[in-house]
Amino acid sequence: MKARLLDLAHARSGDKGDTANVGVIARRPEWYPLLARELTATRVAAHFTGMITGPVERFELPNLHALNFLLHGALGGGGTVSLKTDAQGKTFSTALLRMEIEVPDGTL
Amino acid sequence: MTVRIASGQGFWGDWLEAPVRQIEGGPVDYLMMDFLAEVTMSILQKQRSRDPALGYARDVVPLLARILPAVVERGIRVTTNAGGVNPDACAAAVAETARDLGLRGRLKIGVVTGDDILARLDDLLARGVTLADMDTGRPLSDIRDRVLSANAYLGSAPVVQALAEGAQVVITGRVTDTGLTLAPLVHAFGWSPEAWDLMAAGTIAGHIIECGAQASGGNYLAGWPTVPSLEDVGYPLVEAEPDGSFVVTKHPGTGGAVTVASVTEQLVYEMGDPRQYITPDGVADFTTVRLAQDGRDRVRVSGIRGRPATPYLKVSIAYAAGWKAVGTLVYAWPDAYAKAREADRVLRARLERLGLKFDEVLTEFVGVNATHGPLAGEPSPDLPEVQLRVGVRAGDRDGVERFTRELAPLILNGPPSVTGFAGGRPKVEQVVAYWPALVPKAEIRPAVRIVAA
C-alpha cells in the first residue's frame, strides 16, 4: 500500500548557503528501515523536480532513526541573495513529507 | 559534579524574556547567548562603519542589565558572541551598564577578539593564503573590491582562557555558536582540548541548545499540537557530567517539551554530513549520539565520539552583490489566483517595456505555491484570497528602484479586488552574499582581554 511520508516521519529543514538540508525522522523506530529503503536520493531528487537545480545527497543516522538529505541549489542563491519567501529552506521539511512511499499493508 | 548551562538566546532577535527566565527559573551555572548569523556580521560591519562605537548586537546591553545583579550575586557566568565586529565597544557598554547598576568593581568582563581579518585580507593574499571559495574554488580576487566583512570562526579556546582569567561575562566576536557552550565545560571539567570525544560531546551539547527553544518545543513538528503552554516555553539547558554525557532539560513549571523527538529535530537542523560536523574544536560524529528519555522533559545524551580538529578555520566573507526589492499585493475572491496571475503578467510586461534588466525576477503566489512550489498542486478554484509577491534583483540600483514604483499603480490600473498596499513602496535593499573560505589556524591569533566594570 501507499502511505504519506507525513504519517511515518517528522522532519526539520534548514539552510547552508544555497543548499537546504532536510532531516527526516521515523515516528517509530521500527519504521526507519522502511524509510531507509524507500527514500533514496534519486527518489527525493525526483520529488523536488522543478524546485532544486542541483543534486541530492543522502546520509544515514540509524542511531536517531533519521536520514539527512542535502538539496543543492534549493534556495535561489542562498539566504541573503534569494528572493524567495522561504529563503532559509524552513519549509522543505514538510514539502518532503508530501511524498508517498510504498509500505507493507497494515504498517500504519 | 554537574554543570548546568542554559541557553538564553538563539539568534539576534530572539525572545527578550528568555535570559531572565533562565536565570530566575532554577539553578544554572552558565548562561549561553548566541547572537550571530552570517548576515548579522555584515549588518554590524555597516553599523560600525557609520559609528565606530557600534557594530555589536545592541540588544545584549538592556538584556544583561536585567540579569547582571543576579549573575553577580549568584556567581553565574555568561558566554555570548554579541560582540559582533566590535567586542571592545560591546564590553565598554556592558561595563557602563554594570556601573549604573552599582556593580562597580564587582564584575570582570572578558573580551575575545582576533576573528576579524578584514584589515588583513591583502596581507594574507600576498602571503599565499588564497581564501578561495570553498564550494566553487573561485579566487577571492573575483570579489575583493566588494568585501564588506571577513571573520574567522574561533573555537572555544579563547573563551576558556577568559573564564580561566576570571571573566564572569565573556563577550566575543565570531566564536562558533557551539564553542560558547563547549568552553564552560572545558573550563569547569578541565577537559584537554585534544580529548576529541569530549570536544565532540560539548560541541553537540552546544548544537542542541544554540537555537534556543527549537530543542524544547518550539518549531516542533512531531509534537506541536499537544505541546503545553508555548507562551511560557522553557528554553533548553544542559546538565553536563565530566564524562561527556549530559541531560537536556528545561526549568520546572515552564511550557514546551523536551523529548527524544524534539531533541532529534534540533540535532538534524542545518546538518551536513553527520559524520563530519567540523568545528575549530574538533570533528563531531552525529551518528554516535545516543538519546534516551529520562523522565518528563529530560533527555539523556551519551556515546558521542569525535575526531581530531582540522588545521584550518572557516572564514566567512560578506560582499556586496547588488540590490533587491520584494513587493506584495493581495487579491480577493472571486478568482483571486487568476487576478493575481494577470497582475503579474501586466507588471512583467511593463518592466519589459521600460527596458529594465534584472538578474532575477521571482513571482510567488502566497496561499498557492510560495512554500511548496509545484508540490502544492492545483489550488482550489474558490480561494478566498491570494497574495502576489514579486521580487527582483540586479547589479544596478536604479532598475530595482524603478520596480518599486510599478506595484502601487496596479491597484487602480490592474485587475480588481486588490488591497494590502498600506505598507507603501517596497524597500530597496543591498544584497549581501557570502564567500566561505578556509584559513590555516596559525594565521589567526585570538586575543583575550579582561575589563573591570
Image (spheres, coloured by chain):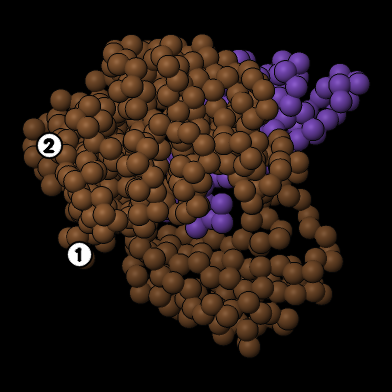
Q: Which mark is residue B218?
A: none
Identify which residue is drawn at 61% across, 45% down.
Answer: B233
Disc 2: which chain? B
Q: Position of residue B160 (x, y in %)?
A: 26, 27
Disc 1: which chain? B
Q: Which mark is residue B124?
A: 2
- What shade has chain A been given? purple
Nearest the eye: B338 or B154? B154
| B345 lies above or below B294 | below
Q: Position of residue B449 (x, y in %)?
A: 15, 38
| B339 lies above or below A102 | below
Q: Position of residue B309 (x, y in %)?
A: 31, 18
Disc 1: which residue = B51
Q: Is residue B169 visible?
A: yes
* Alpha carbon distance from label 1 to label 2: 27 Å
User: Hey, which quadrant is residue B79 in on the image?
Assistant: top left
Categorize mark 2 by other alpha carbons within 10 Å: few (<14), some (14-19), many (20+).
some
Amino acid type of the residue that numbered disc 1 sits on in the rendered structure? Asp
> Please, what secondary structure does the residue beneath circle 2 have?
helix
Identify which residue is drawn at 43% across, 11% down.
Answer: B243
| B306 lies above or below B212 | above
State the residue lying farthest toward the bottom.
B412
User: Hey, which quadrant is residue A35 in on the image?
Assistant: top right
Identify which residue is drawn at 76% across, 50% down.
Answer: B377
- What shade has chain B been given? brown
User: Hey, which quadrant is residue B161 in on the image?
Assistant: top left
Amino acid type of the residue that numbered disc 2 sits on in the rendered structure? Leu
- Are dots 1 and 2 in contact, CB under 8 Å? no
Q: Position of residue B397 (x, y in %)?
A: 34, 70
